Image: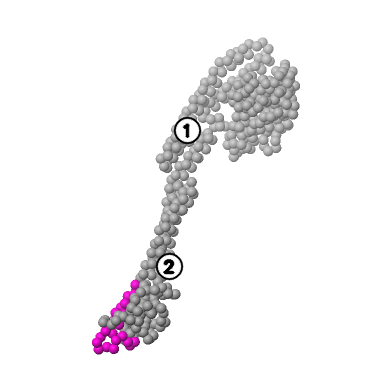
């Protein structure tokens, strides 16, 4: 916008300057010509008047070449001035007898343009003497240099003035554009910061009234958004806190189980659920989950552990299972409790949406570019469409939140999520995690690796 305003100012100011300077330049040229011609006419008329006065004396022989020479000398021998007699005698600057001279000998005084300049012709009219073609004529030649004297300098000055005016107009337009563009740029930067999660971002309304009003609306929107998110966090925290009561009841019931091994296993699961609930409350009460330090977890260990938990149910339903974890560490920058919840969602999705007896396979591998991939395949009917990953749009009778949570978790920690079908027609879900925290010194949480 700033550049467009400058270009618009350049175009408008150029048109105004051109419309102003061209007539002014023509006027300067005409004034220079008039000044030179006026000077020539003054010389011619003065010499003609002197010859007429001296030639009309009763004791004198009239206008003679000697008289003409004396008069020209008295005027300082003005350059280009000639006195032409009827017999062709020329006193002063030599010149030829042209048609203009013949017209002047008939008594006509005029100025005519000729090649190289202009000539001023004035007949010498002696008192009480009839006008005929034998009249003496005073001729003054004005060259083109005299006609244009000072014009070039004036034009250069006018051109410099025009450039100065255009420059001033462009600077003024640039300042004006800056006063308009800067608030818009600040507003854009603030919008990006707000989109990145900085809810304290505000702008100082500035610029024209319309743009300042937009800034005020942005501040109102940011404040309102912060209030809504705070209310949502409080709601999530309260809801999570309510889960403590049934978890406490489960813990009490688990402690009453007679088989100590089963009791310890149930208590361990309840403990993990309590940890997850506490983490959910802490994150909901905090400003943002991104503001918390990100711990590093081993995806292979968590998949092995959670697969063993679900293996009991898989054996009861006759599902063939396969867990393939490539050798080595598979560190990802996702908290262990969130990673475990993600694996649970993927396995639970198989049990919820495939018939009993349908097997599944889980693979964990390193992609070779500091990323780790988790793939879950099943032998079920596959996906009906992409609606399964859109919150609240599941067509299979579920809430539609499971895979949406997986996708959001992967995105939050710099990963990616995909779904598809296996060669046998079953469902395939792949989650790619970014590098571990030690390998992401320059990365911010949630930024793609």
Seen at 73% across and 19% down, the residue is 357
Which corner quadrant of the image does residue 385 belong to?
A: top right
Q: Is residue 30 magenta?
A: no
Q: Are marks 1 and 2 in contact (CB under 8 Å)?
A: no
Seen at 41% across and 63% down, the residue is 25
3D distance between C-alphas at marks 1 and 2? 63 Å
User: Residue 342: x percent and y percent?
Assistant: 64, 26
Seen at 67% across and 20% down, the residue is 352
- The residue carrying pointer 2 sits among few (fewer than 14), some (14 to 19) or many (20 or more) residues within 10 Å by Cα, namely few
Q: Quadrant of the C terminus?
A: top right
Visual colour scheme: one colour
Is 349 placed left or right of 188 in the picture?
right
Which corner quadrant of the image does residue 333 belong to?
A: top right
Magenta residues span: 38-66
User: Residue 184: x percent and y percent?
Assistant: 47, 42
Q: Nearer the viewer, residue 418 or 37?
A: 37
Residue of label 1: 222
């Amino acid at each position: 916008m700033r550049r467009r305003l400058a270009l618009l100012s350049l175009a408008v100011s150029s048109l105004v300057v051109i419309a102003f300077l061209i007539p002014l330049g023509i006027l300067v040229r005409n004034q220079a010509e008039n000044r030179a011609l006026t000077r020539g006419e003054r010389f011619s008329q003065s010499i003609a008047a002197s010859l007429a006065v001296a030639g009309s004396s009763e004791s004198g022989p009239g206008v003679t070449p000697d008289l003409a020479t004396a008069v020209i000398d008295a005027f300082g021998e003005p350059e280009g001035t000639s006195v032409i007699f009827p017999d062709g005698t020329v006193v002063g600057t030599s010149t030829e007898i042209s048609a203009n001279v013949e017209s002047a000998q008939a008594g006509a005084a005029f100025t005519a343009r000729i090649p190289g300049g202009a000539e001023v012709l004035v007949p010498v009219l002696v008192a009480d003497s009839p006008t005929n073609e034998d009249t003496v004529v005073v001729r003054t030649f004005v060259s083109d240099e005299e006609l244009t004297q000072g014009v070039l300098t004036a034009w250069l000055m006018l051109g410099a003035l025009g450039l100065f005016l255009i420059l001033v107009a462009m600077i003024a337009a640039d300042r004006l554009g800056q006063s308009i563009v800067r608030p818009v740029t600040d507003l854009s930067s603030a919008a990006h910061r707000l989109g990145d999660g900085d809810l304290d971002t505000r702008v100082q309304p500035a610029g024209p009234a319309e743009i300042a009003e937009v800034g005020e609306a942005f501040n109102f929107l940011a404040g309102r958004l912060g209030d809504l998110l705070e209310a949502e966090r409080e709601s999530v925290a309260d809801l999570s806190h309510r889960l403590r009561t049934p978890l406490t009841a489960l813990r009490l019931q688990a402690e009453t189980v007679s088989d100590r091994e089963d009791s310890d296993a149930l208590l361990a699961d309840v403990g993990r659920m309590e940890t997850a609930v506490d983490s959910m409350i802490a994150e909901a009460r905090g400003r943002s989950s991104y503001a918390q330090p990100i711990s590093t977890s081993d995806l292979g260990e968590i998949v092995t552990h959670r697969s063993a938990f679900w293996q009991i149910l898989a054996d009861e339903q006759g599902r063939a299972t396969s867990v393939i974890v490539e050798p080595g560490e598979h560190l990802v920058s996702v908290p262990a409790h969130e990673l475990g919840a993600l694996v649970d969602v993927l396995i639970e999705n198989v049990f919820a949406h495939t018939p009993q007896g349908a097997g599944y396979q889980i693979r964990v591998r390193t992609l070779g570019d500091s990323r780790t991939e988790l793939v879950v395949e099943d032998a079920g009917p596959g996906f009906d469409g992409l609606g399964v990953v859109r919150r609240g749009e599941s067509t299979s009778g579920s809430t539609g939140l499971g895979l949406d949570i997986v996708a959001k978790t992967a995105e939050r920690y710099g990963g990616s999520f995909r779904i598809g079908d296996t060669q046998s027609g079953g469902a395939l879900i792949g989650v790619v995690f970014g590098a571990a925290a030690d390998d992401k010194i320059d990365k911010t949480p949630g930024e793609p690796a």
